Each structure stands twice: as structure tokens, then as C-alpha cells.
Image (cartoon, rainbow, N blue to C red):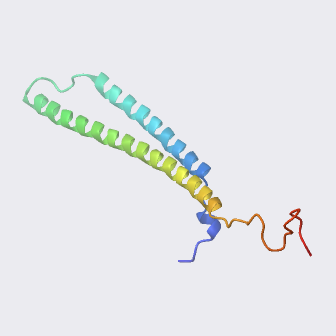
Amino acid sequence: MAPRDEEELRQTNSDLTDAARFFDLEKAHFTADTDALFDVLERIGDIAGSDENGQRFKEGYGKADKNAKSYVHAMEDAYQGIADRLRLMAVSVDLANWSTMAALPKVPDKGPGFSSGDGTMTA
């Protein structure tokens, strides 16, 4: 595999916050879509009947419905977790940029080559 160009790996905090907003939006759409689907299923009503087979169907359907809703909530939590972590990464990038600035060498106030009287360069 060829080495990556340094430019390809560079991420800014705005890239990361944009990605976080995307996951927020995906979560909102996912939640709205799955809520709408569950509402449709609930509006269908009792189609199984009350005989033995109907009761078995209701039990199995109830378990499947509970599992499906659990998986949906897990996906919503995953979307939220990814968005939260991307925001934390953006803060880390910003802090890293500032710490790099703080690590720049300090220029002495009066170093060699400056006159002590007026601060102008000497020849």
C-alpha cells in the first residue's frame, strides 16, 4: 500500500463538527422513520385472533417487536455516541493546535544583535 499524502490525513475541527452534525441528522431521520413504521404496525391492530395459534403469534410478535425496538434504540445511541465523539475530537484538534502554538520557541526580549539602549538592530 502506498504511503498517504500528508494532506489526505489533515482534519480540521470544522470537518469533525460537520461530520457530527451529519450523524445528528441521520439519527433524527432514523428515529422519525422507525417511529413511523412502528406506528403503522400498531395501527394494524389485532389480526392474530384469539385461538391457540393466534396467542402463539401474539407472543412471538411481542418478543420480535420488543427486540426490534431495542435494536432501534441501540442504533440511535450509536449515532449519538459517534456524534459526541466527533465533537470531542474537534475540541482535541483545536487544543492540539493551540498547544503547538504554545510550544513555539520564545524569542528573547534582548538577545544578541540588539542594542541595549533603543532596541534597534546593530550592524
Report the front residue among 38 and 80. 80
Residue 22 lies, in percent from the top left, at: 53, 44
In this rendering, is residue 120 above or below 3?
Answer: above
In this rendering, is residue 11 above or below 63?
Answer: below
Q: How many marks?
A: 0
Q: Left or right: 6 with respect to 57?
A: right
Report the front residue among 110 and 40. 110
The answer to which quarter of the image holds residue 58 is: top left
Q: Left or right: 6 with respect to 61?
A: right
Q: Left or right: 111 with respect to 8?
A: right
Residue most extreme to the right = 123
Residue most extreme to the left = 52
Residue 103 lies, in percent from the top left, at: 62, 64
Report the front residue among 100 and 121. 121
Report the front residue among 105 and 112. 112
Residue most extreme to the front = 117
The answer to which quarter of the image holds residue 63 is: top left
Quarter occupied by the C terminus: bottom right
Q: Residue at x 46, y 45 (%)?
A: 84
Residue 15 lies, in percent from the top left, at: 60, 51
In this rendering, is residue 101 above or below 18?
Answer: below
Residue 35 lies, in percent from the top left, at: 37, 30
Q: Left or right: 80 with respect to 74?
A: right
Q: Residue at x 78, y 66 (%)?
A: 110
The answer to which quarter of the image holds residue 52 is: top left
